[in-house]
């Protein structure tokens, strides 16, 4: 019989669990009871990385506003004006990504059994997770990479903005690999079977796989 883990929300610790013989023991600190936390292991370091990328993007604007001599090289960078045929698709992609993020956040809470959407107690395979393994990271990768384009009216779109967009995409692709390793450690064969049948972020391939299995 699998133990039932409960959490003391006031103290942020687990309550003791009594087994069939009446003895009590401490459970792990993560909501699923495994003691393996993606948030602690990866989310915070990648958050710091994204903060650094954001600073790179903002350097030209900061140089022009602040007038600091040590930012002159960034302040003098050429600025590109984003044409409407790029801006409109970027705005549509940003909106779709935000809606997807909201959708999967509610979905993980509903089927994952935890308030923390990053720490589910089951492998969520419903909704967008039927088609790709990482819809949340795909959504974040899209709307973060669209921000330099959408805010180009106020923040100069320079070479640093291009580097920031490329860095965001690369960072999230690396994060996908790390999360797959994390989930394999956490869920084992169940997640391996999920990986074998569902692509990481390729929606087209995911739709094709679903169609092939149904036929």
Image: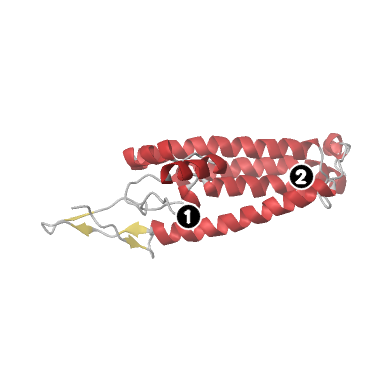
Q: Nearer the viewer, residue 144 or 198?
A: 198
203 shown above or below 127: above
Q: Which mark is residue 58?
A: 2
Dot 1: what SS?
A: helix
Q: Label 1, on which residue?
A: 127
For mark 2, give the secondary structure: helix
Horizontal and vertical percent position of residue 136: 54, 49
Q: Is 186 displayed left or right of 201 in the figure? A: left
Q: Residue at x 42, y 61 (%)?
A: 110
Q: Looking at the image, is 172 positioned above or below residue 143?
A: above
Viewer-proximal residue among 104 and 50 = 104
Q: Position of residue 128 (x, y in %)?
A: 50, 51
Q: Nearer the viewer, mark 1 or mark 2?
A: 1
- Relative depth, front residue between 73 and 158: 158
- Asked whether the viewer can see residue 116, the reply is no
Local crowd at mark 2 within 10 Å, few (<14), some, or many (≥20)?
A: many
Asked where in the image residue 3 lies, by quadrant, the reply is: bottom left
**Residue at x 52%, y 45% (from the top left corner):** 207
Q: Quadrant of the C terminus?
A: top left
Q: Position of residue 205 (x, y in %)?
A: 53, 39
* Residue at the (62%, 44%) spot, across then down: 141
Q: Is residue 205 visible?
A: yes
């Amino acid at each position: 019989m699998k133990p039932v883990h409960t959490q003391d929300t006031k103290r942020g610790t687990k309550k003791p669990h009594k087994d069939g013989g009446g003895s009590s023991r401490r459970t792990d600190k993560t909501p699923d009871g495994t003691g393996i936390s993606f948030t602690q292991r990866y989310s915070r370091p990648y958050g710091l990385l994204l903060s650094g990328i954001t600073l790179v993007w903002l350097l030209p604007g900061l140089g022009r506003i602040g007038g600091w001599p040590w930012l002159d090289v960034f302040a003098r960078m050429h600025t590109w004006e984003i044409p409407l045929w790029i801006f409109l698709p970027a705005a549509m992609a940003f909106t779709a990504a935000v809606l997807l993020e909201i959708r999967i956040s509610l979905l993980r809470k509903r089927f994952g059994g935890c308030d923390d959407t990053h720490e589910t107690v089951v492998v969520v395979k419903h909704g967008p997770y039927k088609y790709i393994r990482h819809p949340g990271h795909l959504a974040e990768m899209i709307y973060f990479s669209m921000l330099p384009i959408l805010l180009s009216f106020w923040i100069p779109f320079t070479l640093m903005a291009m580097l920031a967009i490329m860095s965001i995409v690369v960072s999230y692709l690396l994060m996908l690999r790390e999360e797959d390793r994390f989930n394999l450690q956490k869920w084992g064969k169940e997640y391996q079977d999920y990986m074998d049948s569902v692509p990481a972020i390729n929606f087209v391939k995911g739709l094709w796989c679903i169609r092939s299995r149904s036929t």
